[in-house]
Image: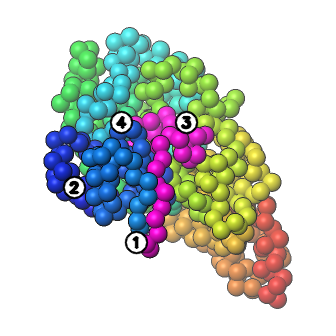
Amino acid sequence: KSGEFVDALKEELAKNELTEKVNIVKTGCFGLCAQGPIVIIYPEAVFYHQVQPKHAKKIVSDHLVKGKLVEKLLYHDNETKEIINKLMDTPFYHKQKRVALRNCGRINPEKIEEYIAFDGYQALAKVVNDYSRDDVLSTLETSGLRGRGGAGFPTFMKWSFAKASQSDQKYVICNADEGDPGAFMDRSVLEGDPHAVIEAMAIAGYTIGANQGYIYVRAEYPIAVNRLRIAIKQAREEGVLGDHIFGSDFSFDLDLRLGAGAFVCGEETALLESIEGHRGEPRPRPPFPAVKGLFGKPTIVNNVETLANIPQIILKGPEWFASFGTEKSKGTKVFALGGKIQNTGLVEIPMGTTLREIVEDIGGGIPNGKKFKAAQTGGPSGGCIPPEHYDVPIDYENLKKIGSMMGSGGLIVMDEDNCMVDIAKFFLEFTVEESCGKCVPCRVGTKRLLELLDKITMGKATLDDLDKMEELCHHIQENSLCGLGQTAPNPVLSTLRYFREEYEAHVLERR
Ligand code: SF4
C-alpha cells in the first residue's frame, strides 16, 4: 500500500514540476501501525495517515504547491476524516521514549550517510579511540542495560564472561529470530535502523575480542534482510566494518545467516546449532555460549533491541540511560501492542510505565466501549495480567511477581468477550507445534497439557483435572531442557491463577 502511494506521489510531483524540489524518503516504521500508511511532510512535520494513492493529488496541490495544510481527505466509504497531526503531538507518542526506535521512521535506512548524520558510528569511534575494553563494560554496568530478548540478563555480565574466556577466536551474534506471534519490534529496528545494530555489534566485538559477527535473521523478513545486506555493504565501504577500523588495529566483519522459521531457533543454543548447519535443537547448559558457543568458541548472543540501545548509551552516557526506568530495570522497553486496542503498533516506554498508561493513554483504550479483561505479555511463554494489576509499573521484577514475563515484548490486550481458557489453549497450541521434541517433559508434557485443555473446553473434564493440569505444568517447568519448555505452561498457570472461575465454569456448566 505504501509503495502504491509513493508511485502516485511521484506522478503528482512530476505533473507539478516538483520532482527536483521534493525529496521522498522511504523510512522504517513510525510505530503507529493502526494509522498506516503514513506520510510526514517536512519541515512542518505534519503527518497524513491512512493515505491512499488517490490522496496524493490533494496533498501535492494543497500542501506542497499552495502551502496549505490538507484538513480532510476522502476515503473509500465516502467518509471524510480529519487528518492533520503534528507527529509528536499525537497522544500515542506522549508517554513514549524512543531510544531503540529513535531512528525508525526518521532516516532512510538504506543510506549510511543519514545514519551518520544522526550521530551514527560516533559511539564506535569513541570506543575504539578512547575506551579500554573494561571501560565499555563498566559503562554498560552503570547503564543497567539488561537483555531485551526475554531473560533480562545484565548485558555487561554476558560480555564480561566472553571477554574473560581465552580463545584464538570469538564471535558476536545478533539474535534476530523473532518468532513470538504478534511481536515485530526486532523487525522494525532492522528495517528502520539496521546500522544501529551493526555499530553495536562492532562495539561488542571490540569489547570481548571478537573479529567476526553473525546476524541470525528470519528469512520471513525480506525487507529486513535486504536492508541489512545493503547496510553491511555500506559499512564495509565506509570502513566501519573490516580491517583497521578508525585506523586502529581492531578488525571486525559481519555476515547474515537466515533462519528457516523454527521458533526454537530463537533460543540461543539452538540458534548456534542452526548456524553451524545442524538441526536447531537447544544444547544443555553449562557450558554457556560465553565460554563455549559457536563452533565451540566464546560467543555472545544479544537480541536486536538490546543492541540498538548500546550506541546511545555510549554517546549520551550510562547515567542518562539509567535515569529512566525503575530501580532494577533501567531504560526503555519496546512492546508490540496488539489485540483489542485502538492504536495497535509499536511503542517504546520507559520501564515502570503502568499497563493502564500503555492501554489507555498510548493505546487509546479498548474499542467499542468494552472493558479491559487482561493483557498477555511475553508472547506464547508469557502470562496474563488481570485488571487488579492494571496499575503495576511494568518491569522485569514486577511482571515475574505477578506470574508473567517481559519476554521479547509482545503485549496483547483482551476485553470482556475473550475466553481465557481459549487464550491459554491458543498459546499452548503454538508451543506444542514449535517444541523441537528433544526432551520428554516438553515434547510429551505439553501435548498432555493441551489434551487436558481440550477436555475442559469440550465439557468432558472434572474439577480434579484442573489440579492435574497444574501439577503437570510444574513438572514441565522444572524438567524441560530449554526456555521454550520451561515457560510453555505460563499462559495456563497465569489464567488458572487469575481466571480459575472460567475454567470451573467450563467444567460445571457442561456437565
Ligand atoms: Fe526442545 Fe522443548 Fe526440550 Fe526445549 S524444552 S529442548 S524446545 S523439547
Residue 76: image tag: 1
2 and 1 marks in contact (CB < 8 Å):
no
**Residue 416 visible in this rendered orientation of the protein:** yes
Q: Earlier in the sequence, mark 3 or mark 1?
A: 1
Most foreground residue, 174 or 221: 221
Q: Which residues are magenta?
A: 76-105
Residue bearing mark 4: 43
- Rounded to the nearest angstrom, the CA distance separating label 4 from label 3 is 22 Å
Q: Is residue 106 left or right of residue 85?
A: left
Callout 1: SS: loop
Residue 506 magenta-drawn? no
Q: Earlier in the sequence, mark 2 or mark 1?
A: 2
Residue most toward the bottom? 511
Residue bearing mark 2: 12
Q: Bin the neighbour count of mark 1 within 10 Å (Cα to Cα): few under 14, some 14-19, many 20 and up.
A: few
The total number of labels drawn is 4
Q: Is residue 190 left or right of residue 178?
A: left
Residue 97: image tag: 3
Location of the C terminus by quadrant is bottom right
Callout 2: SS: helix
Tag in front: 3 or 1: 1
Q: Position of residue 142 (x, y in %)?
A: 58, 20
Amino acid type assigned to the residue bearing label 2 in the image: Glu
Q: Earlier in the sequence, mark 1 or mark 4?
A: 4
Callout 4: SS: loop
Q: Earlier in the sequence, mark 2 or mark 3?
A: 2
